[in-house]
Image (spheres, helix red, strand yellow):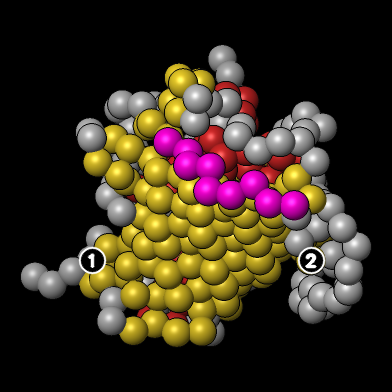
Amino acid sequence: MASALEVLVETLDLEPLEENLFRGRSPQVGWQRVFGGQVIGQALVSALRTVDGGRTVHSLHGYFIRPGDPSIPIIYEVDRYRDGKSFTTRNVVAIQHGHPIFTMAASFQRAEEGFEHQIAMPEVPAPEDLPSEKELLASFSDRVPDNIRRYFSRERPIELRPVMRRNYIEPEKADPVQHVWIRATGPLPDDATLHQCVLAYASDMTLLDTSLLPHAHSLFDPDIMLASLDHALWFHRPFRADDWLLYAQDSPSAHGARGFNRGSVYTRDGTLVASVAQEGLIRQRRS
Protein backbone atom coordinates (compact mmCIF):
# COMPACT_ATOMS: atom_id res chain seq x y z
CA MET A 1 0.00 0.00 0.00
CA ALA A 2 1.38 3.41 -0.99
CA SER A 3 2.30 5.87 1.76
CA ALA A 4 0.58 9.24 2.04
CA LEU A 5 3.73 10.92 0.67
CA GLU A 6 3.86 8.58 -2.32
CA VAL A 7 0.20 9.38 -2.99
CA LEU A 8 1.01 13.11 -2.85
CA VAL A 9 3.90 12.78 -5.31
CA GLU A 10 1.61 10.79 -7.64
CA THR A 11 -1.13 13.41 -7.21
CA LEU A 12 1.30 16.12 -8.32
CA ASP A 13 2.26 14.18 -11.46
CA LEU A 14 -0.40 15.54 -13.81
CA GLU A 15 -1.58 13.80 -16.97
CA PRO A 16 -0.98 15.85 -20.17
CA LEU A 17 -4.11 15.97 -22.32
CA GLU A 18 -3.15 18.47 -25.00
CA GLU A 19 -0.76 21.38 -25.29
CA ASN A 20 -1.35 23.64 -22.23
CA LEU A 21 -4.01 21.23 -20.89
CA PHE A 22 -3.53 18.83 -17.96
CA ARG A 23 -5.62 16.54 -15.79
CA GLY A 24 -5.16 16.06 -12.05
CA ARG A 25 -6.84 13.64 -9.67
CA SER A 26 -7.57 13.81 -5.93
CA PRO A 27 -6.70 11.18 -3.32
CA GLN A 28 -9.80 9.28 -2.22
CA VAL A 29 -9.57 9.93 1.50
CA GLY A 30 -13.20 10.73 2.26
CA TRP A 31 -12.92 14.53 2.29
CA GLN A 32 -16.03 16.42 1.20
CA ARG A 33 -13.99 18.91 -0.81
CA VAL A 34 -10.55 19.10 -2.35
CA PHE A 35 -7.79 20.37 -0.04
CA GLY A 36 -6.72 23.84 -1.19
CA GLY A 37 -3.02 23.03 -1.00
CA GLN A 38 -3.54 20.21 -3.49
CA VAL A 39 -5.05 22.59 -6.05
CA ILE A 40 -2.23 25.11 -5.53
CA GLY A 41 0.40 22.40 -5.98
CA GLN A 42 -1.23 20.91 -9.07
CA ALA A 43 -1.74 24.33 -10.65
CA LEU A 44 1.94 25.08 -10.11
CA VAL A 45 2.90 21.75 -11.70
CA SER A 46 0.79 22.55 -14.77
CA ALA A 47 2.45 25.96 -15.14
CA LEU A 48 5.93 24.46 -14.69
CA ARG A 49 5.26 21.98 -17.50
CA THR A 50 5.04 24.90 -19.94
CA VAL A 51 8.19 26.76 -18.84
CA ASP A 52 11.61 26.18 -20.39
CA GLY A 53 14.38 24.88 -18.16
CA GLY A 54 16.67 27.37 -16.46
CA ARG A 55 13.81 29.44 -14.99
CA THR A 56 12.35 28.78 -11.56
CA VAL A 57 9.10 29.98 -10.02
CA HIS A 58 9.53 32.94 -7.67
CA SER A 59 5.88 33.82 -6.97
CA LEU A 60 2.31 32.66 -7.40
CA HIS A 61 -1.03 34.29 -6.60
CA GLY A 62 -4.24 32.30 -6.59
CA TYR A 63 -7.96 32.69 -5.88
CA PHE A 64 -10.28 29.93 -4.70
CA ILE A 65 -13.59 30.38 -6.53
CA ARG A 66 -15.59 27.21 -5.84
CA PRO A 67 -15.11 24.13 -3.63
CA GLY A 68 -13.38 21.29 -5.47
CA ASP A 69 -15.11 17.92 -5.94
CA PRO A 70 -12.68 15.11 -5.00
CA SER A 71 -14.74 12.47 -6.83
CA ILE A 72 -13.84 13.72 -10.34
CA PRO A 73 -10.63 14.92 -12.04
CA ILE A 74 -9.59 18.58 -12.19
CA ILE A 75 -8.68 20.05 -15.58
CA TYR A 76 -5.87 22.66 -15.57
CA GLU A 77 -5.70 25.05 -18.52
CA VAL A 78 -2.51 27.12 -18.86
CA ASP A 79 -2.22 30.43 -20.72
CA ARG A 80 1.32 31.35 -21.75
CA TYR A 81 1.05 35.07 -21.03
CA ARG A 82 4.67 36.07 -21.60
CA ASP A 83 8.14 34.68 -22.23
CA GLY A 84 10.52 37.59 -21.64
CA LYS A 85 14.30 37.83 -21.42
CA SER A 86 14.33 37.47 -17.63
CA PHE A 87 10.78 36.58 -16.59
CA THR A 88 8.09 34.15 -17.73
CA THR A 89 4.42 34.58 -16.76
CA ARG A 90 1.72 31.93 -16.78
CA ASN A 91 -1.97 31.92 -15.86
CA VAL A 92 -3.74 28.72 -14.81
CA VAL A 93 -7.47 27.98 -14.51
CA ALA A 94 -8.60 24.83 -12.68
CA ILE A 95 -11.95 23.57 -14.00
CA GLN A 96 -14.58 21.12 -12.73
CA HIS A 97 -18.18 20.58 -13.86
CA GLY A 98 -17.58 23.17 -16.59
CA HIS A 99 -16.75 25.98 -14.12
CA PRO A 100 -13.48 27.45 -12.78
CA ILE A 101 -12.79 26.46 -9.18
CA PHE A 102 -9.35 28.15 -8.89
CA THR A 103 -7.27 30.64 -10.85
CA MET A 104 -3.55 31.31 -10.44
CA ALA A 105 -0.91 33.57 -11.93
CA ALA A 106 2.71 32.49 -11.56
CA SER A 107 5.99 34.18 -12.46
CA PHE A 108 9.30 32.48 -13.27
CA GLN A 109 12.77 34.03 -13.43
CA ARG A 110 16.16 33.05 -14.77
CA ALA A 111 18.86 32.96 -12.08
CA GLU A 112 20.79 36.19 -11.53
CA GLU A 113 22.81 37.91 -8.81
CA GLY A 114 21.55 40.86 -6.73
CA PHE A 115 21.27 42.42 -3.28
CA GLU A 116 20.88 40.06 -0.31
CA HIS A 117 19.12 40.46 3.05
CA GLN A 118 16.46 38.71 5.14
CA ILE A 119 14.66 38.98 8.48
CA ALA A 120 15.88 36.70 11.26
CA MET A 121 14.18 33.44 12.16
CA PRO A 122 12.33 33.38 15.53
CA GLU A 123 14.11 31.56 18.34
CA VAL A 124 12.17 28.34 18.89
CA PRO A 125 12.90 24.80 20.15
CA ALA A 126 14.27 22.29 17.64
CA PRO A 127 11.72 19.86 16.14
CA GLU A 128 13.38 16.92 17.94
CA ASP A 129 12.56 18.59 21.26
CA LEU A 130 8.85 18.80 20.45
CA PRO A 131 6.18 16.07 20.59
CA SER A 132 4.73 14.63 17.41
CA GLU A 133 1.03 14.99 16.67
CA LYS A 134 0.41 11.40 17.76
CA GLU A 135 2.18 12.09 21.06
CA LEU A 136 0.07 15.23 21.52
CA LEU A 137 -3.05 13.21 20.81
CA ALA A 138 -2.08 10.62 23.39
CA SER A 139 -1.52 13.33 26.01
CA PHE A 140 -5.21 14.24 25.86
CA SER A 141 -6.16 10.61 26.49
CA ASP A 142 -9.87 9.75 26.26
CA ARG A 143 -11.01 13.38 26.26
CA VAL A 144 -10.45 13.71 22.51
CA PRO A 145 -13.66 13.70 20.42
CA ASP A 146 -13.83 11.26 17.50
CA ASN A 147 -13.52 13.95 14.81
CA ILE A 148 -10.27 15.30 16.30
CA ARG A 149 -8.91 11.79 16.89
CA ARG A 150 -9.59 10.83 13.26
CA TYR A 151 -7.97 14.04 12.01
CA PHE A 152 -4.71 13.50 13.90
CA SER A 153 -4.64 9.72 13.42
CA ARG A 154 -4.88 9.86 9.62
CA GLU A 155 -1.59 9.37 7.79
CA ARG A 156 -0.55 12.55 6.03
CA PRO A 157 2.27 13.40 3.62
CA ILE A 158 3.40 16.35 5.77
CA GLU A 159 4.53 15.98 9.38
CA LEU A 160 3.69 18.88 11.71
CA ARG A 161 5.31 19.71 15.05
CA PRO A 162 3.72 22.82 16.60
CA VAL A 163 5.99 24.85 18.87
CA MET A 164 3.05 26.08 20.97
CA ARG A 165 0.80 23.36 22.33
CA ARG A 166 -2.88 24.10 21.62
CA ASN A 167 -5.94 22.77 23.39
CA TYR A 168 -8.36 21.88 20.59
CA ILE A 169 -10.93 20.54 23.07
CA GLU A 170 -11.30 23.73 25.11
CA PRO A 171 -9.58 26.52 23.11
CA GLU A 172 -8.39 29.59 24.97
CA LYS A 173 -7.69 33.07 23.64
CA ALA A 174 -4.10 33.55 22.49
CA ASP A 175 -2.03 35.97 20.45
CA PRO A 176 -2.49 35.46 16.67
CA VAL A 177 0.96 33.93 16.26
CA GLN A 178 2.04 30.31 15.85
CA HIS A 179 5.19 28.48 14.80
CA VAL A 180 5.08 25.00 13.30
CA TRP A 181 7.92 22.78 12.09
CA ILE A 182 6.95 21.00 8.86
CA ARG A 183 8.54 18.46 6.53
CA ALA A 184 7.59 15.69 4.11
CA THR A 185 7.22 12.36 5.91
CA GLY A 186 9.89 10.70 3.77
CA PRO A 187 12.71 11.41 1.32
CA LEU A 188 11.86 13.13 -1.96
CA PRO A 189 13.72 12.94 -5.31
CA ASP A 190 16.42 15.52 -6.05
CA ASP A 191 14.03 17.65 -8.12
CA ALA A 192 13.94 21.29 -6.95
CA THR A 193 10.60 21.94 -8.67
CA LEU A 194 8.99 19.00 -6.85
CA HIS A 195 10.17 20.41 -3.51
CA GLN A 196 8.59 23.74 -4.43
CA CYS A 197 5.30 22.04 -5.30
CA VAL A 198 5.31 20.07 -2.03
CA LEU A 199 5.86 23.29 -0.08
CA ALA A 200 3.05 24.93 -2.06
CA TYR A 201 0.83 22.05 -0.90
CA ALA A 202 1.96 22.36 2.73
CA SER A 203 1.69 26.17 2.81
CA ASP A 204 -2.11 25.91 3.04
CA MET A 205 -1.86 23.87 6.26
CA THR A 206 -2.41 25.58 9.65
CA LEU A 207 -2.17 29.11 8.19
CA LEU A 208 -5.85 30.08 8.33
CA ASP A 209 -6.12 28.63 11.86
CA THR A 210 -3.86 31.46 13.07
CA SER A 211 -6.67 34.00 12.70
CA LEU A 212 -8.84 31.98 15.13
CA LEU A 213 -6.37 32.07 18.03
CA PRO A 214 -7.50 35.43 19.54
CA HIS A 215 -11.13 34.26 19.50
CA ALA A 216 -10.85 30.97 21.41
CA HIS A 217 -11.97 28.89 18.43
CA SER A 218 -10.36 26.11 16.41
CA LEU A 219 -10.96 24.50 13.04
CA PHE A 220 -12.82 21.67 14.80
CA ASP A 221 -15.56 23.93 16.22
CA PRO A 222 -18.89 23.00 14.56
CA ASP A 223 -20.07 26.64 14.59
CA ILE A 224 -17.09 27.88 12.53
CA MET A 225 -16.91 27.93 8.71
CA LEU A 226 -13.35 28.01 7.34
CA ALA A 227 -12.33 28.36 3.70
CA SER A 228 -9.28 29.74 1.91
CA LEU A 229 -10.19 32.69 -0.33
CA ASP A 230 -6.83 33.55 -1.87
CA HIS A 231 -3.23 32.44 -1.49
CA ALA A 232 0.11 34.00 -2.40
CA LEU A 233 3.51 32.34 -2.16
CA TRP A 234 6.97 33.73 -2.87
CA PHE A 235 10.04 31.49 -3.21
CA HIS A 236 13.26 33.24 -2.15
CA ARG A 237 15.99 30.59 -1.91
CA PRO A 238 16.54 26.85 -2.56
CA PHE A 239 15.41 24.32 0.06
CA ARG A 240 14.38 20.71 0.55
CA ALA A 241 10.82 19.97 1.60
CA ASP A 242 11.93 16.68 3.19
CA ASP A 243 14.11 18.58 5.70
CA TRP A 244 12.57 20.37 8.67
CA LEU A 245 11.26 23.86 7.84
CA LEU A 246 9.94 26.35 10.38
CA TYR A 247 6.59 27.84 9.32
CA ALA A 248 6.33 31.08 11.36
CA GLN A 249 2.79 32.48 11.07
CA ASP A 250 0.84 35.52 12.26
CA SER A 251 -2.55 37.10 11.62
CA PRO A 252 -2.40 40.92 11.61
CA SER A 253 -6.15 41.41 11.07
CA ALA A 254 -9.60 39.82 11.06
CA HIS A 255 -12.66 41.74 9.86
CA GLY A 256 -15.84 41.17 7.87
CA ALA A 257 -15.76 37.37 8.43
CA ARG A 258 -12.28 37.28 6.84
CA GLY A 259 -8.96 36.52 8.49
CA PHE A 260 -5.67 37.70 6.99
CA ASN A 261 -2.59 35.57 7.66
CA ARG A 262 1.13 35.68 6.84
CA GLY A 263 3.83 33.06 6.97
CA SER A 264 7.62 32.92 6.75
CA VAL A 265 9.36 29.62 5.99
CA TYR A 266 12.90 29.02 7.28
CA THR A 267 15.40 26.19 7.05
CA ARG A 268 16.92 24.88 10.28
CA ASP A 269 19.95 27.15 9.89
CA GLY A 270 17.72 30.26 9.80
CA THR A 271 17.64 30.84 6.03
CA LEU A 272 14.39 32.43 4.84
CA VAL A 273 13.30 30.36 1.83
CA ALA A 274 9.66 31.40 1.25
CA SER A 275 6.92 33.82 2.31
CA VAL A 276 3.17 33.24 2.29
CA ALA A 277 0.06 35.42 2.57
CA GLN A 278 -3.54 34.28 2.67
CA GLU A 279 -7.00 35.63 3.41
CA GLY A 280 -9.71 33.19 4.36
CA LEU A 281 -13.32 32.99 5.41
CA ILE A 282 -13.73 32.63 9.19
CA ARG A 283 -17.48 32.86 9.49
CA GLN A 284 -19.31 32.00 12.71
CA ARG A 285 -22.52 30.13 11.95
CA ARG A 286 -25.71 31.69 13.26
CA SER A 287 -28.54 29.54 14.55
Question: In the shown orientation, is residue 3 left or right of residue 98?
Answer: right
Quadrant location of the N terminus in the rendered image: top right
Q: How many marks?
A: 2
Residue 110 % position (x, y) = 79, 50
Observer-side mark, 2 or 1, equals 2
Horizontal and vertical percent position of residue 157: 60, 37
Q: Which mark is residue 203?
A: none
Determine if the magenta segment contains residue 83.
Answer: yes
Q: Is residue 203 above or below residue 73?
A: below
In terms of depth relative to the viewer, which is nearer, 280 or 21? 21
**Image check: 283 left or right of 84?**
left
Asked if disc 2 and disc 1 are in contact, CB closer than 8 Å, the reply is no
- Which residue carries the number 1 mark? 223
Q: Main secondary structure of the magenta part?
A: strand
Q: Which residues are magenta?
A: 77-85
Q: Is residue 74 visible?
A: yes
Q: Position of residue 244 (x, y in %)?
A: 77, 52
Left or right: residue 44 versus residue 62 is right
Which residue is more in the foreground, 79 or 116? 79
Q: Earlier in the sequence, mark 2 or mark 1?
A: 1
Numbered mark located on residue 272 in the image: 2
Q: Residue at x 48, y 39 (%)?
A: 78
- Residue at the spot x=50%, y=21% of the render? 15
Indicate the secondary structure of the residue bearing disc 2.
strand
In the picture, residue 234 is in which quadrant? bottom right
Amino acid type of disc 2?
Leu
Q: Which residue shows up at 37% across the image and 62% down it? A: 229
Q: Can the viewer see residue 183? A: no
Report the side of 78 relative to 281 (left or right).
right
The residue type indicated by label 1 comes to Asp
Q: Is residue 162 above or below residue 27?
A: below
